Image (cartoon, coloured by chain):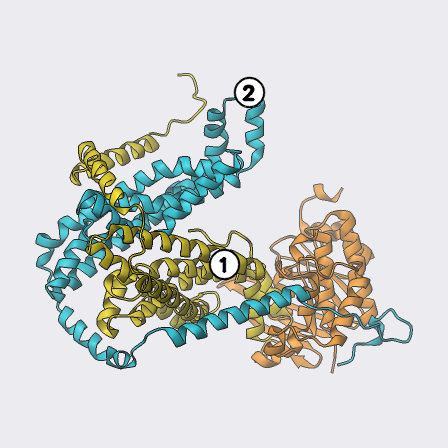
Chain colours: A yellow, B cyan, C orange
């Protein structure tokens, strides 16, 4: 048989086939048929009709909600970043012994395990309705996210730079400031700014389960069938988040971090 | 400790004094401004936000109460009330991710300035991607429950719409970072734009593409689990009903199940990642 | 008491039964430029790193400035390390910091963590840093980021950093192995000049025998973890080189 220019990869074809078969199976399971989709679109058109034009039916309530979401995200980000820095360091296996890293990594894993909404529900039960639950929820989420990625970043640093600083006789903390931080700081700022952005988004939605912010306003508007108000709120949320992203870009520029520190 | 005279080059022993600063005056001013703004934001927020201290002190007791009600876990409920919705959640996540990729790839291409050289088109594509990401999947779910009625269809489309922004942005950025040399080479042979896309861009994009897809699927499993709280299908609906009925031992079962499928998803993603990237 | 460097019966094994250093004993006086040559894996790098204890010896003694190094506790070890400057094969600069910050980091052993973090350097240190940059030929480079420099430039920064420590001993682990021949000669010249100015001994690992013969005042040949030659560069006959490196073809 003549030699082939490209090797046959049956495994790859098999993978694609399985993937597609599963998707069709799943669609059938969920009863997602084209007919339902079209019906839905018709419904959707009606729904959209009721949403436009957007109307701010309760400006005070909306302003309060937006402000509260902003405050929740600011405080949760502040607490989260401040706590995640030492937690990330203590979780790094190239800096700390295992009796320190193991419990810390466990803590970070637990913080990441649950969706913020679920964490919000638990905190609402613990500290009652309102912003406190929201702040605690997003702090936990921040620690889980930044902590894990920061620890990974520290474990990936070049040991050569650390070795050189150690050879000068520098104390441990100077080892961190000169050998470790310069290598990971821009990534830390990237993670932190991504998390601040994520907190801003999540702060708009934890209100749906009572943890404060504009989410509560949105949910009640929805339940009252005030769809035009719903639309106004959603647009306001989008606007607030876009402003937040621009702010984050300025901060990164002032701190001299590479523009692409985040990925969303 | 004075430096030995042997190291200097000036006659008389001591070198002339030269200043050095780490940051330029502008940089320093910028950093100070940033610090001031951040501190102001935090302080103002603390003072304005409504926090009721009594609830904080009550918290440990409340948590204790909750935990005792959640234990022991009602494992028996699994087959009746958890298994099916759990599978539904997986389907929602997978279909939603697949749908989002279909829509995200063209948008990502449109947003890439090196492939589609029309600035307005790039801008529109980017705006759509940003808008998609700015609306939380739970809120998308709420909207689509309004459109399609409660059920998994709403959840799937919500996941899809939320993920488009994520996937599209990362693909667009990856495309913009592609090496132009193979592109140039293929264009020089007279290949059509489609061929150039397939044979010069795709091979470079492929590892990022799969990495992003897997990453988003992993996140979507987590997201899909809670959409049911607003009626968009999956295990979230069981969570909602059991919470409303205060059946906390079943709630803990559901939370445990969610934890397990998220863990499984991560294991799966790590394994697949090792093999194809 | 001998105030130079004295190594007595140094041994190091990374795995049981597989010694990398088999009882090395050496005496170094002031003002020597010692080149250690030998094939890869023969323990040259381990030997050099044992001196400032970046690698912990399995047994033996190292005496420097009247102090025994192998058994030193943490704080005295740091104080000893700051008197030993080291130049690395891959420069080991902090890539994201500027040239000036890299050079100044040579003073970290003398500064508290607090002043180090705040970058509060003494003006004398800053002046010295500028002077050193002039001496290594990098005037005007102080604000450039380390990762924007060429290999030869980076190594010069590395040398300046080591000298910033006011060391009593300079160690260099294959300082020119990553550089082209012309730059290698320049860097070796700078290194040797610095040693002469400071009147301190320099110990250099290298695999380029010709370069070693050109710059060193004493050559130590290692093979399989032991010293097989210790003497003047002129004494390196073909036979001796063969016993160190094995094989004939590379000699011609």
Q: Are marks 2 and 1 in contact (CB under 8 Å)?
A: no
Looking at the picture, tell me which residue is in the foreground, B174 or C3: B174
Element marked by disc 2: loop
Q: Chain of mark 1?
A: A
* Relative to B63, residue B128 above or below: above
In the picture, measured across the screen, residue A222 lies left or right of residue B8, that is left
Element marked by disc 1: helix
The answer, for residue C23, to whether it is visible in the render is no
> Which image quadrant: the C terminus of chain B?
top left
Q: Nearer the viewer, mark 2 or mark 1?
A: 1
Q: Chain of mark 2?
A: B
Please tell me how crowded label 2 is: few (under 14), some (14-19), or many (20+) other residues with Cα within 10 Å.
few
Name which quarter of the figure residue C233 lies in. Answer: bottom right
The x and y percentages for residue C58 are 55, 70
Looking at the picture, tell me which residue is in the foreground, C228 or A156: A156
Q: Which mark is residue B190?
A: 2
* Relative to A153, residue C82 above or below: below
**Number of numbered discs present?**
2
Looking at the image, which residue is at 68% across and 55% down? C38
Looking at the image, which residue is at 74% across and 65% down? C160
Looking at the picture, tell me which residue is in the foreground, B274 or B163: B163
The x and y percentages for residue A147 are 41, 64
Q: Are marks 2 and 1 on the same chain?
A: no
In the picture, measured across the screen, residue C102 lies left or right of residue B183, that is right
Please tell me how crowded label 1 is: few (under 14), some (14-19), or many (20+) other residues with Cα within 10 Å.
some
Q: Separation of disc 2 and disc 1 at Cα? A: 44 Å
The x and y percentages for residue B219 are 32, 51
The answer, for residue A233, to whether it is visible in the render is yes
The x and y percentages for residue A226 are 23, 53
Looking at the image, which residue is at 39% across and 58% down? A198
In the picture, measured across the screen, residue B58 lies left or right of residue B276, that is left
**Tag 1 residue:** A247
């Amino acid at each position: 048989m003549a030699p082939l220019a490209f090797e046959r990869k049956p495994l790859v074809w098999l993978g694609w086939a399985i993937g597609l078969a599963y998707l069709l199976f799943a669609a059938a399971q969920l009863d997602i048929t084209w007919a339902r989709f079209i019906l839905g679109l018709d419904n959707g058109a009606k729904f959209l009709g009721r949403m436009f034009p957007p109307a701010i039916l309760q400006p005070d309530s909306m302003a309060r909600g937006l402000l509260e979401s902003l405050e929740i995200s600011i405080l949760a980000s502040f607490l989260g970043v401040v706590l995640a820095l030492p937690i990330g360091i203590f979780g790094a296996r190239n800096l700390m012994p295992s009796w320190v890293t193991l419990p810390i990594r466990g803590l970070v894993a637990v913080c990441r395990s649950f969706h913020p909404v679920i964490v919000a529900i638990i905190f609402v039960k613990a500290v009652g309705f309102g912003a406190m639950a929201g702040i605690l929820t997003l702090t936990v989420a921040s620690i889980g996210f930044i902590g894990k990625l920061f620890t990974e970043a520290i474990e990936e640093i070049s040991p050569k730079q650390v070795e050189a600083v150690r050879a000068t006789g520098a104390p441990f903390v100077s080892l961190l400031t000169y050998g470790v931080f310069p290598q990971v700081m821009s990534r830390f700022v990237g993670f932190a700014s991504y998390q601040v952005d994520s907190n801003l988004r999540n702060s708009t939605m934890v209100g749906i389960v009572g943890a404060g912010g504009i989410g509560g306003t949105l949910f009640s508007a929805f339940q009252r069938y005030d769809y035009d108000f719903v639309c106004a709120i959603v647009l306001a949320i989008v606007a607030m988040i876009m402003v937040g992203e621009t702010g984050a870009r300025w901060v990164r520029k002032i701190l001299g971090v590479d523009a692409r520190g985040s990925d969303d | 400790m004075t430096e030995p005279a042997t190291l200097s080059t000036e006659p008389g022993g001591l070198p002339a004094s030269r200043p050095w600063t780490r940051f330029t005056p502008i940089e320093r001013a910028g950093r100070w401004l940033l610090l001031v703004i951040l501190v102001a934001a935090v302080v103002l927020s603390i003072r304005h936000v409504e926090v009721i201290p009594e609830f904080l002190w009550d918290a440990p007791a409340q948590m204790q109460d909750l935990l005792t009600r959640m234990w022991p876990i009602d494992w028996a409920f699994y087959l009746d009330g958890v298994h099916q919705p759990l599978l539904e959640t997986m389907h929602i996540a997978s279909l939603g991710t697949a749908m989002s990729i279909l829509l995200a790839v063209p948008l990502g291409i449109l947003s890439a300035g090196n492939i589609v050289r029309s600035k307005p088109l790039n801008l529109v594509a980017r705006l759509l991607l940003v808008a998609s990401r700015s609306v939380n999947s739970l809120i998308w779910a709420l909207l689509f429950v309004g459109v399609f009625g409660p059920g998994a269809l709403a959840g799937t489309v919500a996941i899809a719409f939320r993920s488009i922004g994520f996937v599209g942005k990362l693909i667009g950025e990856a495309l913009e970072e592609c090496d132009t040399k193979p592109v140039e080479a293929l264009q020089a042979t007279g290949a059509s734009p489609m061929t150039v896309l397939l044979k010069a861009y795709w091979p470079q994009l492929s590892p990022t593409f799969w990495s992003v897809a897997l990453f988003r699927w992993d996140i979507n499993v987590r997201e899909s689990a809670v959409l049911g709280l607003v009626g968009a299908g999956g295990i979230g609906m069981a969570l909602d009903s059991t919470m409303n009925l205060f059946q906390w031992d079943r709630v803990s079962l559901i939370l445990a199940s969610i934890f397990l499928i998220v863990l499984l998803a991560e294991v799966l993603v790590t394994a697949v990642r090792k093999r194809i990237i | 008491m001998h105030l130079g460097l004295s190594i007595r019966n140094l041994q190091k094994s990374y795995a049981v039964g597989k010694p990398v250093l088999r009882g090395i004993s050496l005496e170094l006086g002031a003002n020597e430029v010692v080149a250690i040559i030998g094939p890869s894996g023969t323990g040259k790098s381990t030997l050099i790193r044992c001196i400032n204890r970046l690698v912990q010896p399995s047994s033996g003694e190292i005496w420097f400035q009247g102090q025994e190094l192998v058994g030193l506790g943490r704080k005295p070890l740091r104080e000893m390390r700051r008197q030993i400057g080291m130049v690395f094969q891959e420069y080991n600069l902090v890539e994201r910091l500027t040239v000036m910050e890299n050079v100044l980091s040579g003073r970290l052993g003398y500064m508290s963590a607090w002043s180090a973090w705040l970058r509060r350097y003494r003006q004398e240190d800053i002046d010295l840093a500028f002077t050193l940059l002039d001496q290594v030929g990098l005037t005007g480079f102080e604000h450039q980021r380390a990762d924007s420099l060429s290999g030869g430039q980076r190594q010069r920064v590395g040398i300046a950093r080591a000298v910033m420590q006011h060391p009593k001993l300079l160690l260099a682990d294959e300082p020119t192995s990553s550089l082209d021949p012309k730059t290698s000669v320049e860097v070796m010249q700078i290194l040797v000049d610095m040693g002469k100015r400071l009147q301190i001994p320099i110990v250099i690992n290298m695999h380029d025998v010709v370069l070693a013969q050109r710059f060193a005042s004493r050559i130590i040949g290692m093979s399989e973890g032991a010293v097989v030659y210790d003497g003047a560069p002129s004494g390196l006959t073909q036979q001796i080189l063969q016993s160190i490196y094995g094989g004939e073809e590379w000699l011609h």
